Image: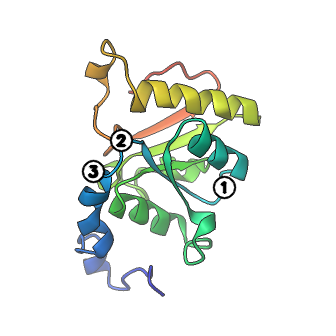
Amino acid sequence: MPFALCPLPCLRRKRMDTLASRLGGIIEGLTDAPRVYCDANLPAGLIRFMRERLRWDVFFVMEEDDLRRASDIEHFRMAAQLRRTLLTLDKDYLDDVRFPPAESSGVLVMSAPHQAQFERLLTEIDRVLFHPSPDTRASVDASRMPLRGRKLHVHTDWHGETK
């Protein structure tokens, strides 16, 4: 059970030094590609789109046997440990009590009815968040985790607002 949660409430919030957390900074430096953690509810076609068209570094939980059936809180914590923006379709992550923004590397919740609209949203996210133009860079953290400590819910009528 490598990703088991600590049973003691007093220790759950304490950040533990793990291999993933220690290697996060090193791994970040190996690529300029946006680094995202995609939970199990994203379709394989979107994973392929992010990897092949957008050239993102995508960690997809369905490719990891130990994480396929992990709870939402385990995914939330693992994304933060790996220093990746959590990308999901699950609106449960918008609950700030269960998933405190300050404890995250950023959470991006997407909503759209069709694959083509998801692809348009991902392309816009890439442009606005991960590759901002000089005139919009001031409003977006230029780091590889532009949503660190924040959440963003994007849907078909989203036009690049980051607040």
Q: Position of residue 84 (x, y in %)?
A: 40, 52
Q: Earlier in the sequence, mark 3 or mark 1?
A: 3
- Residue position for label 1: 41
Q: Is residue 123 above or below residue 41?
A: above
Q: Is residue 138 above or below residue 61?
A: above
Q: Position of residue 137 (x, y in %)?
A: 30, 21
Question: Marks 3 and 1: which is nearer the front?
Answer: 3
- The disc placed on residue 153 is none
Tell me the kind of residue under disc 1: Asn
Q: Earlier in the sequence, mark 2 or mark 1?
A: 2
Mark 3 and mark 1: Cα distance apart in space? 28 Å
- The disc placed on residue 32 is 2
Tell me the kind of residue under disc 3: Gly
Left or right of 162 in this view: 134: left
Dot 3 falls on a residue whose secondary structure is loop
Tell me the kind of residue under disc 2: Asp
Q: Determine if residue 155 is in view.
A: no
The foreground one among 90 and 115 is: 115
Dot 1 falls on a residue whose secondary structure is loop
- Residue position for label 3: 29
